[in-house]
Image (cartoon, grey):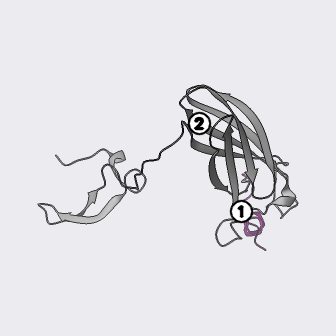
């Protein structure tokens, strides 16, 4: 009695509330957050909704064996998957624009209900700065603006923020202090 599955609560599944209760043993325990715990709102729409935007970032350069140098690394590609819900079948022009200056536009046919399309966008190394872990460098983020214009009706927009980074597993003698410093990019 009173026991929950491990996935019923915790920082990663259902955060604890900031309120407490005393059980029969005298322990001061957190209440479990069950149900709605973030903002809920209703939106009026014209029959065309961008439900999700999922940017998938791919590094196009050579496989690195040392930390990437600013603007001297390979390009990236952002494959932006846009999940759309429509009340009726329609054609619409999808435009994806990056705050670094790149853009791509294409026209798609959407069926009634749920659909998703992917549109690629190349990101030249010269146009962006890499995202670095805290304490090692800056964490620049770039806006990815999505605009969906149906043949009839209002344009629907969405924005996501992305960072560019490539991680590589480079194996070596991790018992050698010099190797570990070089691998970490620390001199």
Q: What is the magenta segment's predominant secondary structure? A: loop
| Marks 2 and 1, the one that precedes in the sequence | 2
Image vertical order of residue 19 relative to residue 109, above or below? below
Looking at the image, residue 108 sits to the left or right of residue 44; the answer is: right
* Visible residue check, residue 28: no
**Residue found farthest to the left:** 24
Looking at the image, residue 65 sits to the left or right of residue 55; the answer is: right
Total marks in image = 2
Location of mark 1 (residue): 131
Q: What stretch of residues is rendered in magenta?
A: 169-187
Image vertical order of residue 16 relative to residue 114, above or below? below
Instruction: Specify the quadrant that holds the C terminus.
Output: bottom right
* Crowd around label 1: few <14 · some 14–19 · many ≥20 (10 Å): some
* Visible residue check, residue 134: yes
Residue at the image point whose x is 79% and y is 48% from the top: 103
| In magenta segment, residue 126 | no
Location of mark 2 (residue): 84
Residue at the image point whose x is 66% and y is 46% from the top: 55
């Amino acid at each position: 009695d009173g026991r929950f599955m491990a996935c019923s609560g915790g920082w990663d599944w259902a955060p604890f509330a900031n309120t407490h209760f005393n059980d029969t043993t005298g322990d001061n325990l957190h209440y479990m957050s069950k149900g709605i715990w973030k903002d809920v709102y209703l939106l009026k729409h014209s029959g065309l909704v961008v439900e999700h935007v999922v940017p998938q970032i791919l590094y196009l350069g050579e496989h690195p064996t040392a930390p990437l140098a600013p603007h001297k690394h390979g390009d990236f590609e952002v494959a932006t998957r846009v999940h759309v819900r429509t009340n009726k079948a329609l054609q619409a022009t999808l435009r994806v624009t990056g705050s670094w200056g790149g853009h791509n536009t294409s026209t798609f046919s959407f069926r009634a209900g749920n659909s998703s399309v992917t549109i690629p966008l190349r990101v030249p190394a010269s146009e962006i700065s890499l995202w670095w872990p805290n304490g090692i460098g800056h964490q620049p983020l770039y806006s990815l603006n999505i605009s969906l214009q149906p043949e009839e009706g209002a344009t629907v927009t969405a924005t996501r923020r992305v960072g560019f980074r490539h991680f590589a597993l480079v194996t070596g003698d991790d018992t050698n202090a010099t190797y570990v410093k070089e691998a970490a990019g620390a001199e």
